Image: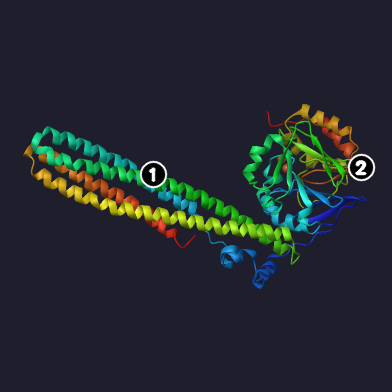
């Protein structure tokens, strides 16, 4: 499991985990994120069951588990959070922030000790190490109850499946040539994202934020102007291609 | 910000390769789970799909319910035949409640064991889950290559304890099922006595009813044999798990 420090200000650090060489071939590659704010950690979309041992080891290499008291699941997919039951065993005091809509579903992954904070549709802001962390609504992108995480201090947006790319081989961590990258995002967004209206609502919302880094759950990370380029591209892209 | 060269590790620890991991396993003596279980059980699970075995045993047992109901019907028919024979049929009629009773015992015992088999399957599934957690925590520990995490240790202890308790609960449930079926097998022996009695009583009946009543005895013998056969199969399946959980 590759660990990469994405951002480091005096009191907040962002880490990305992914490109696990031990990952079984047929499992979709995922990015997991950890935000550490003044020693308090938020683990985001911690991933599937298969990935758990490598993820746990990677997290422990950065922080002691006792400081991971917040976990976030953008939505209910297995690649996002099927490891929940295992995290529940080693983060007994943690709170899982996830869409209210999915509580009864997510508990199927096993959750006996952690507390579920059902995020309301309009989103929520919490404090992590004294700093604000916003859970931004991203409903129907692609899941009907869906949130992203925005850290206004570091200007990082963890964007779940939005911005995801399915690229063969072992792609680098960052987008280099945006135009060349679009081919790997197009099919995914057209087929997985169901609603043009939801898409436009999200774009409008994100345009109001100051985003310097956009971190999707699959594929490469967008930095600086690439974020705007992505928003423009996504705005033009018709989605919901499954309906013939 | 920069892109990483392919295959390079930035800040994380490189994953141990398979060989190293195995060597590590061999060297390591003290695993938390070993407080409760032997090494082989925790590291190389040889778990059979016990929930499948239990479900097969339950379906085998469920087949006896229809046979028991047939036995009840036979008893009811026999009562009618004996009643038609009047005074002469009285002794035969007195046998029929025993047939009913035997059928009822079989139905209720089987229902009880089938319900336990369902509970057993749940326990077995839970066991698999906990076993998965145990293995995942151990893999994480291997990847950490000696770096201690108190919280991880606690999770391991908890999972190991849950594994032990789940195994115990399965063993208990299994013993309960085996015991109940063994008792039923013993009770079924009375079926042969009832059948013999009905043959004797039938022989004392007028010729025209003798055939009907003889066939009652034959039905009892056949039904009991069928129930016993299904029970024997179910018992074999359940016993095969004893000592192998
Ligand atoms: Fe998803
Ligand atoms: Fe995903």
Q: Which mark is residue A177?
A: none
Question: Compared with residue B93, is residue B34 higher up or lower down, i.e. above or below?
Answer: below
Question: Is there any visible trace of residue A170 in the rendered image?
Answer: no
Please identify the residue farthest to the bottom as the structure is shown: B27
Question: Compared with residue B184, is residue A148 higher up or lower down, i.e. above or below?
Answer: above
- Percent position (x, y) of residue B184? 32, 51
Query: At x 59% / y 56%, what residue is drawn?
Result: B162
Total marks drawn? Answer: 2
Label 2 CB sits under 8 Å from any ligand 2 atom: no
Q: Chain of mark 1?
A: B
- Percent position (x, y) of residue B4? 85, 55
**Residue A52 lies in quadrant:** bottom right
Q: Chain of mark 2?
A: A
Give the distance between the C-alpha atoms of the residues marked 2 and 1, in whole angstroms.
67 Å
Left or right? Give the position of B154 relative to A7: left
| Viewport quadrant of the N terminus of chain A | bottom right
Q: What residue did someone put label 1 on? A: B111
Left or right? Give the position of A25 relative to A59: left
Question: Is there any visible trace of residue A151 in the rendered image?
Answer: yes
Which callout, 2 or 1, points to the residue nearer the camera? 1
- Percent position (x, y) of residue A146? 74, 36
| Viewport quadrant of the C terminus of chain A | top right
**Residue B107 lies in quadrant:** top left
Query: Where in the image, quadrant-wise, is ligand 2 located?
Result: top right
Left or right? Give the position of B127 relative to B178: right
Query: Secondary structure beneath disc 2?
Result: loop
Query: Secondary structure beneath disc 1?
Result: helix
Please identify the residue farthest to the left as the structure is shown: B206
Q: What residue did someone put label 2 on? A: A224
Categorize mark 2 by other alpha carbons within 10 Å: few (<14), some (14-19), many (20+): few
- Percent position (x, y) of residue A158? 82, 42
């Amino acid at each position: 499991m590759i660990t990469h420090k994405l951002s480091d200000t005096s009191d907040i650090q962002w880490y990305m985990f992914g490109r696990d060489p031990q990952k079984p071939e047929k499992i979709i590659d995922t990015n997991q994120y950890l935000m550490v704010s003044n020693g308090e950690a938020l683990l985001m979309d911690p991933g599937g069951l298969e990935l758990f041992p490598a993820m746990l080891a990677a997290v422990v290499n950065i922080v002691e588990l006792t400081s991971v008291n917040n976990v976030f699941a953008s939505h209910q997919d297995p690649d996002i959070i099927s490891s929940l039951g295992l995290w529940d065993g080693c983060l007994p005091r943690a709170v899982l922030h996830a869409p209210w809509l999915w509580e009864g579903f997510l508990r199927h992954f096993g959750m006996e000790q952690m507390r579920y904070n059902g995020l309301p549709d309009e989103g929520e802001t919490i404090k992590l190490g004294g700093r604000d962390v916003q859970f931004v609504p991203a409903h129907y992108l692609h899941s009907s109850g869906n949130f992203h995480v925005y850290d206004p201090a570091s200007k990082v947006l963890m964007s779940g499946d939005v911005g995801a790319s399915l690229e063969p081989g072992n792609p680098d961590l960052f987008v280099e040539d945006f135009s060349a990258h679009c081919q790997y995002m197009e099919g995914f967004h057209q087929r997985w994202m169901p609603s043009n209206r939801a898409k436009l609502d999200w774009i409008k919302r994100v345009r109001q934020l100051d985003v310097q880094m956009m971190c999707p759950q699959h594929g490469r990370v967008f930095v600086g102007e690439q974020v705007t380029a992505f928003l423009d591209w996504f705005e033009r892209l018709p989605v919901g291609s499954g309906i013939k | 910000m920069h892109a990483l060269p392919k295959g390079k590790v930035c800040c994380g620890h490189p994953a141990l390769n398979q060989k190293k991991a195995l060597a590590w396993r061999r060297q390591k003596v003290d695993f938390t789970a070993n407080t409760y279980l032997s090494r082989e059980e925790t590291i190389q699970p040889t778990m059979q799909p016990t929930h499948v075995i239990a479900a097969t045993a339950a379906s085998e047992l469920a087949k006896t319910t229809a046979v028991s109901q047939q036995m009840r019907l036979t008893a009811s028919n026999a009562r009618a035949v004996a009643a038609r024979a009047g005074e002469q049929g009285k002794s035969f009629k007195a046998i029929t409640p025993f047939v009913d009773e035997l059928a009822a015992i079989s139905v209720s015992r089987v229902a009880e064991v089938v319900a336990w088999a369902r509970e057993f399957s749940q326990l077995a599934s839970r066991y698999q889950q906990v076993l998965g957690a145990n293995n995942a925590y151990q893999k994480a520990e291997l990847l950490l290559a000696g770096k201690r995490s108190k919280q991880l240790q606690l999770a391991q202890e908890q999972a190991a304890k849950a594994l032990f308790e789940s195994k115990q609960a399965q063993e208990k449930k299994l013993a309960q099922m085996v015991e109940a079926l063994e008792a039923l097998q013993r009770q079924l022996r009375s079926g042969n006595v009832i059948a013999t009695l009905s043959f004797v009583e039938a022989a004392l009946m007028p010729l025209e009813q003798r055939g009907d009543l003889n066939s009652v005895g034959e039905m009892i013998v056949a039904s009991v044999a069928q129930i016993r056969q299904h029970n024997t199969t179910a018992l074999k399946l359940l016993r095969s798990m004893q000592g192998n959980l």
